[in-house]
Each structure stands twice: as structure tokens, then as C-alpha cells.
Image: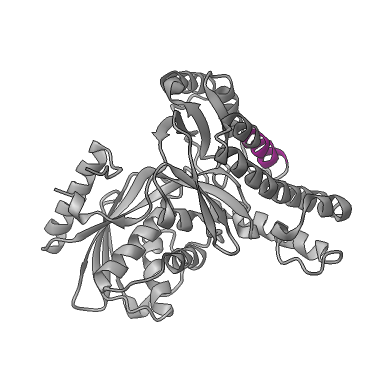
């Protein structure tokens, strides 16, 4: 039997979701799932039309769904124990800061694009930690999207689904994110990362070598990207592009600037803008080199690129923090670690580590103990393999 990718706890949670949907709405619903993600390398390059290397992880948001006979969307969150209801025709892009903005946003963007989404009842439950940089928002958006499409009987290309979810986050949550999070939630493949060109949306699967695990360490320091720091970085990158167009008139984004061109023309940029641009341009080059290392199963070399990425994010892009830096330092002191770096938007959240399978238990206990001793917080640590992307899982619930 093919593995579902769900742990026993997750299967129990999915059954509880299906049962709550039946209890609350009076009939059985179909259940859909979308994963969170971790980015192995390629941070803050996606909204600069660059390259990224994410993997879907075995932490999921699940949505039970069934059609209604009216034009309303009713959604209940088991995690927040809260129900919200909307008229589909009256959905507007006002930001409320509520979890339901993501659900409402997906439906609103679909309707604005002429996709015939019908009224629906939804129940939502997830185990992607919120505020940890593992894309709980994208998992919710994508699970909602495939649920609404499913109960509406609409077929849609997964690239368009990812773009709809990205637009929902822009317009309904206020975060001008790139396409990476929603894309990998749609296209994840078990035991593989993907190399994604964020401009063309072409992608290539990269098998993760056996004998290694993706270990994610949550600093328990939560970030809030929509407060402005994330969007400000994007604005700084756009300012760099405008400056560099004086010398390179054909560039559309920092992705189009080589390291040699930046060395030639970037010295007159204001210091902050120059450092932001230097990170993005060097990170794009690192992603492509890291992809070659992964194809060759050269995890030592891959880990060196992870280390370079973290330093660039810390010093040039300035999105790390003391807790993230400490977590990386502690990881690098453990045996069996190929590489460690912050992952996600930054300002807290998680680190990603590639660790030999037989060293994972020692890694977990050592990092957790030392981090708690120095910070006073008990970190959550997740041991993952790359997971499948969004799909219907109704038949797997019994």
C-alpha cells in the first residue's frame, strides 16, 4: 500500500475533522490537504524573479468541504474554535487580521477571475505551526483552493491555483510574498526538493539523498511579516533595480543582474540598498550551485552553500535575529550536520538543517537542551522528509 504521508496523529486529526464537519453541517464532506514547506536555500529571491529550492514537508492543513445551495461561504476552524460566514458576491479585499482572511481571499480572487466557485461549507484544521516561517498561510490558501474547486466541479491548472493563492495573500493579508510558498504546496513531491524559476515557473525535481533528514528547529520566536519589514525589503530591492537600470537598461529584476555586473555598477548604491541587492544576486548564484551539488549527492558542498546563505541573510539582508543565529551555531556544533541556516522570511521562526539519519536523535536532544539553557525557551523540533503536494485525501480517512 502506498504511504499516505500522514502520521498516526495526523490520521486521527483528519478523522476528527471529517466528524466535526458532519456534526456541524449535517452531511459528509470531502477532505483536502496541502502541506507547509521548508526552503533549503534561496531566501528572498522569489519576489525578485529568482531561483528557490523548497520542499514540501509532512505538516499539513486539511479542509473538509461540501457544497451549499446558496451563495454563502461558511468556514469553521477547529484550531481557533471559530466560525465565519461570507456572501460570495460581497467579498472585498479589506484586511481584518483574522485567520479567515486567507480563506475569504482565495474565494474572492477566484470569483474576480470568473471562476464559478459555488457556495460551500468548510471546516479547517492544521498542524503547520503558525508564525514559524513554514508557510501555514500558503497551506491554508492552497487547501482552501483545491477544496473550493473540488466541490464546485472546476478543473484548474496548478500553476494558476498557486497564482490565485499568492494574490489572495497580497490583497487579503497584506503580505507581498513571492510565488514559492503556494507553488511548492501545490507541486511538492515525496523525497524531492524542487528548483523553481520564479519568473517562468519552470521547475526541476531534485532527489534528496537517502540517509539524511530535514530537521527544522523552531526558535519559538514568532515573526509577523505583514507588519512592514518584509514589504520594506521588497521595496529596497525594487529601488536597487531602478538604480541599476542606469547601466543595465534591459533588466526587469535583480534576477537579471550577474555578480560581475553588480561588482561593476553597484558600488554607488546607498549602503542599505547595496547590501540588499548583494544578498539577492549572490543567493541566486548559490541556489544554482547548490542544485548541482544536490544532483551529485554532494551534501558537504550543499551545506557550505547553506552556511553562506545564512551569513548573507544575517549581514546583508538583516532578517536574522539572535535566536536564529544561536540555533545555527548550536547545530553546527553537532555531529552529522551537513548544513544549517535560517529559513523563511526571518525575524524569528525556524532554521533548516540537513542531518545524517543516525545522528538525528542526538542532534534533537543536544540542540534543544543547549537552546533552552541559553534562551529559556523549549524549541519545537520537527524531523521531516519531503512530502507530496496538495491533494484530496477523502478516501484515506476511515
Among the 4 quarters of the image, the one containing residue 305:
top right
Q: Residue at x 17, y 57 (%)?
A: 21
Dominant SS of magenta comes to helix
Pick the front one: 76 or 50: 50
**What stretch of residues is rendered in magenta?**
306-315
Quarter containing the N terminus? top left
Q: Is residue 111 left or right of residue 290?
A: left
Q: Position of residue 198 (x, y in %)?
A: 58, 59
Q: Relative to 362, say whether 173 is above or below.
A: below
Q: Position of residue 33 (x, y in %)?
A: 31, 54
Number of numbered discs visible in the structure rendering: 0
Q: Residue at x 72, y 58 (%)?
A: 254
Pick the front one: 195 or 117: 195
Q: How is the image coloured?
A: one colour
Whether residue 99 is visible: no
Q: Residue at x 40, y 67 (%)?
A: 106
Q: Relative to 357, say whether 349 is above or below.
A: below
Q: Position of residue 217 (x, y in %)?
A: 48, 32
Based on the picture, tell me whether residue 309 belongs to the magenta stretch.
yes
Q: Position of residue 234 (x, y in %)?
A: 65, 58
Whether residue 56 is visible: yes
Among the 4 quarters of the image, the one containing residue 210:
top left
Q: Is residue 276 left or right of residue 2?
A: right
Q: Residue at x 43, y 25 (%)?
A: 357
Based on the picture, tell me whether residue 256 belongs to the magenta stretch.
no
Q: Is residue 176 left or right of residue 135?
A: right
Amino acid at each position: 500500500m502506498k504511504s499516505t504521508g500522514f502520521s498516526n496523529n495526523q490520521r486521527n486529526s483528519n478523522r476528527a475533522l471529517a466528524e466535526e464537519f458532519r456534526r456541524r453541517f449535517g452531511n459528509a464532506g470531502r477532505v483536502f490537504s496541502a502541506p507547509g514547506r521548508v526552503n533549503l536555500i534561496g531566501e528572498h529571491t522569489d519576489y525578485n524573479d529568482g531561483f528557490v529550492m523548497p520542499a514540501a514537508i509532512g505538516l499539513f492543513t486539511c479542509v473538509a468541504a461540501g457544497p451549499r445551495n446558496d451563495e454563502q461561504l461558511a468556514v469553521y476552524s477547529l484550531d481557533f474554535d471559530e466560525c465565519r460566514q461570507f456572501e460570495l458576491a460581497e467579498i472585498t479585499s479589506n484586511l481584518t487580521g483574522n485567520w479567515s482572511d486567507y480563506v475569504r481571499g482565495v474565494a474572492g480572487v477566484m470569483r474576480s477571475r470568473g471562476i464559478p466557485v459555488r457556495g460551500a461549507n468548510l471546516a479547517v484544521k492544521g498542524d503547520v505551526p503558525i508564525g514559524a516561517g513554514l508557510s501555514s498561510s500558503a497551506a491554508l490558501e492552497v487547501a482552501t483552493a483545491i477544496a473550493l474547486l473540488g466541490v464546485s466541479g472546476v478543473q484548474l491548472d496548478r500553476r494558476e491555483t498557486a497564482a490565485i493563492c499568492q494574490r489572495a495573500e497580497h490583497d487579503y493579508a497584506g503580505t507581498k510574498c513571492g510565488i514559492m510558498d503556494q507553488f511548492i504546496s501545490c507541486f511538492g513531491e515525496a523525497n524531492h526538493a524542487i528548483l523553481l524559476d520564479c519568473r517562468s515557473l519552470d521547475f526541476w525535481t531534485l532527489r534528496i539523498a537517502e540517509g539524511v533528514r530535514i530537521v527544522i528547529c523552531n526558535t519559538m520566536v514568532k515573526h509577523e511579516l505583514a507588519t512592514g519589514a518584509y514589504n520594506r525589503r521588497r521595496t529596497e530591492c525594487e529601488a536597487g533595480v531602478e538604480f541599476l537600470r542606469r547601466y543595465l537598461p534591459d533588466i526587469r529584476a535583480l534576477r537579471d543582474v550577474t555578480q560581475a555586473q553588480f561588482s561593476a555598477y553597484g558600488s554607488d548604491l546607498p549602503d542599505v540598498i547595496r547590501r540588499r541587492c548583494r544578498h539577492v544576486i549572490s543567493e541566486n548564484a548559490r541556489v544554482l550551485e547548490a542544485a548541482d551539488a544536490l544532483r551529485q549527492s554532494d551534501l558537504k558542498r550543499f551545506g557550505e552553500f547553506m552556511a553562506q546563505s545564512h551569513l548573507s541573510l544575517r549581514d546583508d539582508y538583516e532578517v536574522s535575529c539572535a535566536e536564529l543565529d544561536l540555533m545555527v551555531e548550536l547545530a553546527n556544533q553537532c555531529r552529522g550536520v551537513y548544513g544549517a541556516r535560517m529559513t523563511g522570511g526571518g525575524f524569528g521562526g525556524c532554521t533548516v538543517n540537513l542531518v545524517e539519519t543516525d545522528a538525528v536523535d542526538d542532534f534533537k536532544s543536544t540542540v534543544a537542551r543547549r537552546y533552552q539553557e541559553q534562551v529559556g525557551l523549549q524549541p519545537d523540533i520537527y524531523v521531516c522528509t519531503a512530502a507530496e503536494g496538495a491533494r484530496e485525501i477523502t478516501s484515506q480517512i476511515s
